[in-house]
Image: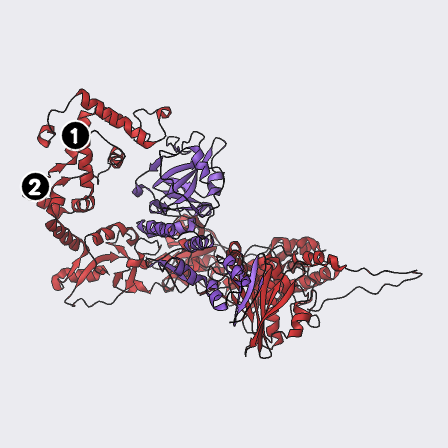
Amino acid sequence: MEVASIINRDSLSATIGTESFNIPSSHPKFEDIRRALLDGTPGEEILPMFQTAKAVVDYTDGAIEIRGGKVFFANEEVGGSVVDRILEFMSEKLPNKPLFRFLERVMRNPSMRSREQLYDFLEHKNLPLTTDGKFLAYKSVSNGYMDHHTGKISNKIGSVIAMPRHRISDDPSLGCHTGLHVGALQYAADFGGSDRKVVICEIDPEHVVSVPLDCECQKMRVCQYRVVADYTGPIERSLVDDYDDEESYDEDEVTSTQ
Amino acid sequence: MVITQDRPSPASTGVKSEVGFTIDPRNLAHVVGLLRDAYSDPIAAVLREYSVNAYDAHVEAGIPDRQVHITLPGRFDPTLKIRDFGRGLSEDQIESLFCSYGASSKRQSNDYTGCLGIGCKSAFAITDSFSVTTYHGGRARTYSCYLDESEVGKAALLSDVASKETGLLISIPIKKDQMSEVESTAVKVFRFFKVQPHIENPSTKTTIELSRPQYDYDGGDIKIAKEAGDSMVIMGNIGYPLEASQLPSDKLREIIDHHTIHLHMPIGAVDIAPSREDLKYNPRTKAALVAALSKGFVEVGQKAVMDIAGSTNLLNALSVYEVVFNAYHLGPYIRKLGLTPKYKGKELKSSSLSVSLSEEEIAKHRVTVRKLSKLRYNRRGRNYELTATDSIDVRSGTVVYLDTKSSVHDFFGRVRTLLETPGFEVAYVVKARGNGLDFLRKKYPLLQEIQFTPIEDVAFTEAPKTTVNGVSAGPIAKHDEEVFTLDTAMIGRYSNKQSDYWKSAKVNLSNPNGGVYLEIDRFLINGVTSPRNFEETYNSFCKLGFDEKVYGFKPSVVEEIKKGNHPQWVSLHDKRIELLNAKIARDPDAFWNYYFFFEHKSDQEDHIESFMSEELVLPAGSVAAQYQQALRDCSKHTDLMSRCRYEVHCHAESMAKDIKPKIDCDLLQQAYNARYPMNIHWDWDNDSFLKDNTTIKARRQRNHKHLSDYIRLVDECKPIKTTINQKEVK
């Protein structure tokens, strides 16, 4: 199979046999393809690298199915943001287990509506998964780690804050309603006045209740979260270590995990 | 497009010598870069430029009505593809036209929109390489066009194979963060295309629906747009913003400032900026705009006068009057041209019809006139109101409904099509009983000319698609049916239409197998409960082993069953009792041995969940620990018991058998509260006995220790003599 290509900094063009491909550097297999083309790898071996859908299925050991352009896990359609997560994991050559754990936790969420809204929320950046399948989000609190709304709930590192799920509305059109609120980085960073700080929270997808449509789906109502660290800067990685050992936590360790 | 060259050769006298301006090849990259960076919206530029070229290729090939095919980039294939079916480009044309900045073969004719020789390189504004495949002369040649270190660009031939196809395929890699922008931009870019492209979204396997502008009035070359926005000049598929401030005429400037005008001009009539994003406001363009607008507004006025004179009813005439002659600045401008609107020979002076009625008249003649208007959006969707009015203001598309009957079933269901129409603002409802309508027409003769729409004649039509929470309204033919099955795929999902939860079904009630049904009215369970709130109940059935299809029967069908003719059909309520009893029979201890109160939660009892937590370690053998353990044991059976609690049947059985639970959490709680009185001061929200937050420690586990320390202290000071039992508590 004849191979010809032009490899540039931000993109590459290639023809393999009668098929032609153009991919940007953000393609999950860009580096692999670039190396393969430069190494003179046979076209038959390079061709599957361009087939992203198949690569996703292979990466997830068949747990993810793609039918008619839609993506399914355990026979339930999952949002496009999950595909983005998978592609990020593939691109960064991360293990697939955390993704499975994440999806299993999502499936444990009792409300389909909540599950669908969660996918919208995960479109935002800097919301990495943890190795045990939870994800991190952000919350604005007072300098004394108390919540802004009541001023009574402590959000110190290690705190687990929970409330009964049935008291929280899963209607996304309700902008303001009872619930524990966390948000994407931008939302949390902009929330509150001068007496405030941002903490990083770990959320089990099972505990997600709704993502209100206001604020561009940047805030989320949950029924439980755990405060795991002070915010010191955007988390650019797709996967972070667990925050399992509550007792051994201190600020130095938190900083070292980011 | 023919580019006008209006610069004459200069005359010269006494010149000693002259030097021509040049571009040093070393500076070429800079100049080319300026051209590439001229686009303020690079994604729009890429879509526009390649599609314009593709459309021109179809014109050249004699297939101007054929659609260009566009494939949007998706998660699995991040490439934007634009494919035309023209003649393609030969090797020479690739070199001389495609790869040459400023080269164009279209400057000899105004049949083509292209002319600048820059657009085909516009992809370099968003990527450093893209490919072009030309299907020409029995070959398919794929070139990679890329920016090299010279920044000018090169094209490399990657493949050359036999092909019977013709045309050109442009493939552009799109970065992840630009992908969503491509689709939204395409919708804007192609709204003025005469032949809109066929656009596919491979991620959803759907075709993108492109809209066209909606007009209040189509006056030929000038159209008055419904939506507020910039006035535009439409030339050769492209809309260019029309800057009122650039016009030399005050009158025209005022009209453009206050209305959204779309002025259609022939290709080449005005000059455009190299980016094709703006007009070039040179004297030629300004003069052409003034001439076209002046002529266009005369045409608008003449057409409006003719339309009004030829209107079949007053409503139509007034709606034209409203948008043309009643329009701010435009109306006076047209009137000054000597154009007068006349309907049936009488001059129209207002688009408003008075219907002022006194209370006595309303009472006596049983007539009201109300305005149906859109209020605002709220969380339940659109909100409308009907308010009494004393004038009917006619605008484009105004409808006046006539309601002569004592009640019209589902008024909003009938007018919904109108309400959901984009641009809808107002409709009127004339309610007239007895001789009310005659009275109204006698008092206001102009109303005789109005064509009312009898509301009872308006059929339930297919509702237009709505976007409330992303759920589309579909046809409502289901309303006429009586038997449905519950759509389990919809359970837990949100729809603003109750009928979305039900699928049409055909059922023979005589079928000996029967089934399980719910009575539904207006698609609400028992006429009250929305199926969207049925998730928890349905899931509890499933936990009991229920896996049958659930039918939804309208009351008439249920009535038939209740006559006793079809005993094989059981209601879901009866089925539930049957399943619960079966489960209790299988596992009697789980039900009869515990008494639990989770279903009656108060604020204090909410904290039971925290009390049961594994994190709270209590002294072994204490009353508190017994209570905690009992709660944990009971919680394993919560679902079963909470379900049973609602069933009178089960409750009655326990009463009849005088069955007492072996573990009664209510009693244990009383014992716990009696032994540890400070417990009631424990603040679960703050994990402290005190409300003062300063005493609160960061970790919940440590705070729990306060409570367990207190319990230990009580037990040490006041040892337990006997194990607590129910009699002792009583």
Amino acid type at circle 1 is Gly
Quadrant where the N terminus of chain B sits is bottom right
Amino acid type at circle 2 is Ile
Q: Quadrant of residue B474?
A: bottom left
Q: How is the image coloured?
A: by chain
To which chain does the residue with label 2 belong?
B
Question: Residue sitting at 83 percent across and 61 percent down?
Answer: B20
The one nearer the camera, B641 or B609, is B609
Is residue B529 rendered to the left or right of residue B93?
A: left
Q: Colour of chain B?
A: red
Q: In x, y percent, where is residue B21?
A: 81, 59
Q: In x, y percent, where is residue B91?
A: 64, 74
Is residue A23 rendered to the left or right of residue A102?
A: right
Label 1 sits on residue = B621
**Same chain, marks 1 and 2?**
yes
The crowding category of the residue bearing disc 1, from other C-alpha atoms within 10 Å (few below 14, some 14 to 19, many at least 20), is few
Label 2 sits on residue = B659
Q: How many marks?
A: 2
Quadrant where the C terminus of chain B sits is top left
Q: Colour of chain A?
A: purple
Position of B573 relative to B702 (above/below)? below
